[in-house]
Amino acid sequence: MKMGTDDFLSMVYNYIKSPEKTVELINNAFSELCLSHESLWYRPPGYYEILDYDEVYVIGDLHGDYETLIEIMSKEQFIEKLSEYSGVKIVFLGDYIDRGAYQLEVIASVLLLKYLFPENIVLLRGNHEPPPFLIPYPHDFPEHLIQRFGVEGKELYYEFLRIFQKIPVVARIPERILFLHGGVPLEVVKAKCFEEVFSIGYPTIDDWILEEIIWSDPLNNPSVLYEYSFRGAGILYGPQLTEKMLQLANTKYIVRGHEAIDGYKLDHGGKVVTLFTSKIPYGLIQGSYMYFRKEDDLSDIEQFIKLI
Ligand SMILES: [Mn+2]
């Protein structure tokens, strides 16, 4: 069935009219998050392999910036593309909620995308989709829901927390890109293979590895392996850790979000690419996202970054 942006937005609106409808959406998306699909190989709870694709979009942190999401959606004709053919993949790097004015709209949009187009959508987890033991600051999503729905908003928050625990933390296009929210966990130092890092403690990823993946930032000092982070969670990882991660993952780049920058930035000799899509809640001038096709040569990755 052919769909357009307006059809999609009215579906989102329908789902967030009441807490009951929102819970229905959460439950629908929940089962899709935990299933493997033909062209997205999902290994619980760690990662997705993106195996079969013609083109890929990568969207960074949104933080309730619905305007920018809609702007990209309309400009790139996401919904039309998704409803017409199966070759497009969209990777979201996490941090859908907190800070912005339209947090419920944004999280409902990405869950609805996952529900409608499960084979095409990769949702990754950011530090604002938190484990209960590590709540970020600010975390105004619960208040946002209470303001909207009263006491029922509080119960709705727990439904969201439940689904956040199921969102994978890593995706990979073999030989090309590793996608995650924050960075490289220290565990890579002694790991001998990729699965060792991302499937430790199966069926649940170990808490500290999860923390380091969703909270860490790159550190531009080649002589330092890592430092403790000013954020109070995660680490600052040096280029040596990036090299080890790329070697384990068998990819050329790490594409991540997490840092609120204007546009994008490159670290560790261009091997760590930071995208930040949200603008309005931060007063930033430009947001960034990425687009490339299967046949593109990614050796100059900067040319595939788009500004909005
Ligand atoms: Mn973040």
Image (spheres, rainbow, N blue to C red):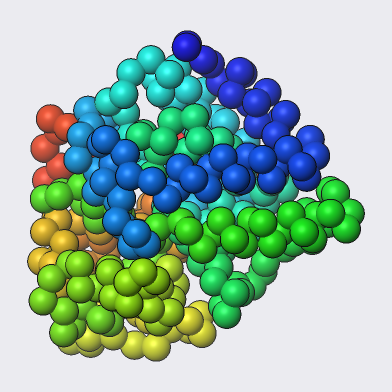
Work out whether residue 1 or residue 251 is closer to the camera in this orientation and state it.
Answer: 1
Which quadrant of the figure has residue 207?
Answer: bottom left
Q: Where is residue 172 drawn, in percent x and y?
A: 24, 52
Res. 305 visible in picture? no
Q: Where is residue 61 drawn, in percent x and y?
A: 49, 52
Q: Residue furthest right?
A: 150
Res. 251 visible in picture? yes
x 74%, y 61%: residue? 142
Q: Where is residue 200 drawn, in percent x and y?
A: 28, 75
x 38%, y 15%: residue? 84
Which quadrant of the figure has residue 273?
Answer: bottom left
The vertical placement of 299 against 163, above or below, is above
Q: Where is residue 36 drawn, in percent x and y?
A: 33, 44
x 69%, y 62%: residue? 158
x 50%, y 35%: residue? 115
Work out whether residue 39 or residue 83 is closer to the camera in this orientation and state it.
Answer: 39
The vertical placement of 294 against 274, above or below, is above
Number of labels in the image equals 0
Residue 242 relative to residue 281: left or right: left
Work out whether residue 245 or residue 41 is closer to the camera in this orientation and state it.
Answer: 41
Residue 285 relative to residue 297: left or right: right
